[in-house]
Image (cartoon, rainbow, N blue to C red):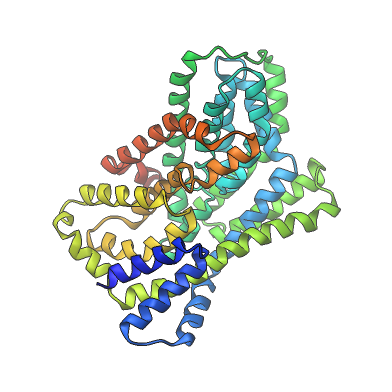
């Protein structure tokens, strides 16, 4: 019964238009009342404990790094470099979008920020070149959702803190799935573009390509620094976030000289504003997480899925379908915060590797960013490109299907996810 109280009260409060963070607190109050005790001190204490985590310091610094990258010209140089290499081939601007999305994902870890930056630059170019605008927006949206999977990922940080899983291992395990997401939408784009006849960019000489690559060198160096530092244990993910922010600021101010001192307050303010929303959600989810454990909801869920406990692959597939459905109605961060404390005990009881499950779980939630009715990233693309949502939904379908197929292939072949971790931790 407590499961239905939890789900019903949460959905009812959100249906009334209450923000998710307040709905989580309200849901906690309803559960406390049902369980026979109400103590505001418990709510305050668990909100404090939920946000009082050293690894969560990575969130504001990666947000800040993303702001510095976009304002400092790193994003634009990555797009220009990709255009120099593949812009001349048929459908070249689509491949540019995917290449730039993968590189930017390895810099900031924010799907919304990456998508907004890509769409603002590439959508006008693709529209002028004769590409189908809805399909182009769909491609850019699906390219943007690679960011929560490839390190440094804010989603993986939140999952790692909430589920008690090594963030470093999650970062390393997310590399191949993120790359496969990019490859899948490239193949889907190649199939879609056969029906169009867009104008291609002029082919660049090798000298021009090398010049653009050299210009983007400082942007390309950052993911090497982060992954290398994590691999050799030089710094933790939280320290990596600080390094990313300082590095991006240094490149933007000293090397590219596109960030002015007068811009810093505005950039820091925007990063702080986004961080405040995330951290309040994390704090509110601490209340629900404590009550979920107190009410023994994970054990009740384990009893529901007991027939599948002997088949980890089948159980993982069922949970992925469940998360995919939930992701259409809830935004990325609330879904992670609500479901992680419910599912993790079940995963451990079934003998499924938490790192492997965490990567698939975040990948699944990333797909929710481009599925209506919520579809945060879809809304961002529509806003930037000034196109109706209905058209972009049709345009995103081939790429969403391709990435969903990749996710379920990883359910069948878990060794693909775990191979980089086994190799890098030797």
Residue 264, placed above or below residue 404: below
Residue 398 x/y as whole percent = 42, 29
Residue at x 42% of width, y 52% of height: 329
Q: Nearer the viewer, residue 186 or 393?
A: 393
Residue at x 68% of width, y 21% of height: 209
Residue 182, placed above or below residue 335: above
Q: Nearer the viewer, residue 69 or 246?
A: 69
- From the viewer's perspective, tell me whether residue 337 is left or right of residue 349: right
Residue 426 visible in the picture: no
Residue 269 x/y as whole percent = 73, 60
Q: Nearer the viewer, residue 73 or 8?
A: 8
Residue at x 46% of width, y 20% of height: 192
Most extreme residue toward the front, as rendered? 16
Residue 352 x/y as whole percent = 27, 55
Quadrant, the N terminus: bottom left
Residue 289 x/y as whole percent = 40, 71
Residue 229, placed above or below residue 141: below
Residue at x 69% of width, y 23% of height: 210
- From the viewer's perspective, tell me whether residue 20 is left or right of residue 296: right
């Amino acid at each position: 019964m407590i499961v239905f109280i939890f789900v019903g009260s949460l959905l009812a409060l959100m249906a009334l238009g209450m923000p998710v963070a307040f709905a989580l607190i309200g849901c906690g109050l309803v559960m406390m009342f049902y369980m026979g005790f109400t103590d505001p001190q418990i709510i305050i204490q668990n909100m404090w404990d939920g946000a009082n985590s050293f690894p969560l310091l990575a969130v504001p610094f990666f947000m800040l790094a993303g702001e510095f990258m976009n304002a400092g010209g790193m994003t634009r140089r990555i797009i220009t470099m990709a255009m120099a290499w593949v812009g001349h081939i048929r459908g070249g601007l689509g491949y540019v979008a995917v290449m730039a999305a993968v590189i930017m994902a390895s810099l900031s870890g924010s799907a919304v920020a990456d998508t907004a930056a890509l769409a603002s630059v590439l959508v006008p170019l693709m529209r002028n070149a004769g590409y189908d605008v809805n399909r182009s927006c769909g491609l850019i949206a699906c390219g943007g959702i690679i960011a929560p999977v490839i390190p440094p990922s804010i989603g993986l940080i939140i999952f790692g803190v909430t589920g008690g899983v090594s963030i470093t291992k999650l970062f390393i395990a997310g590399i191949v799935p993120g790359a496969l997401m990019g490859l899948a939408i490239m193949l889907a784009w190649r199939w879609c573009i056969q029906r169009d006849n867009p104008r291609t960019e002029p082919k660049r000489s090798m000298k021009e390509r090398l010049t653009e690559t050299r210009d983007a060198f400082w942007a390309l160096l950052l993911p090497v620094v982060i992954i290398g530092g994590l691999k050799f244990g030089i710094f933790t993910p939280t320290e990596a976030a600080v390094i990313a922010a300082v590095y991006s600021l240094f490149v933007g101010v000293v090397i590219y000289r596109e960030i002015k001192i007068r811009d810093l307050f505005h950039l820091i303010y925007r990063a702080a504003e986004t961080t405040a929303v995330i951290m309040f959600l994390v704090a509110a989810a601490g209340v629900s997480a404590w009550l979920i454990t107190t009410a023994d909801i994970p054990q009740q869920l384990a009893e529901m899925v007991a027939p599948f406990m002997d088949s980890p692959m089948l159980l993982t597939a069922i949970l992925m379908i469940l998360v995919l459905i939930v992701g259409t109605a809830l935004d990325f961060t609330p879904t992670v915060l609500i479901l992680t404390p419910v599912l993790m005990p079940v995963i451990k009881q079934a003998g499924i590797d938490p790192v492997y499950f965490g990567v698939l779980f975040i990948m699944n939630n990333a797909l929710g960013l481009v599925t209506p009715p919520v579809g945060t990233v879809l809304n961002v693309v529509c806003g930037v490109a000034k196109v109706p949502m209905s058209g972009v939904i049709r345009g995103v379908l081939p790429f969403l299907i391709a990435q969903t197929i990749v996710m379920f292939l990883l359910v069948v072949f878990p060794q693909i996810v775990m191979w980089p971790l086994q190799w890098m931790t030797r």
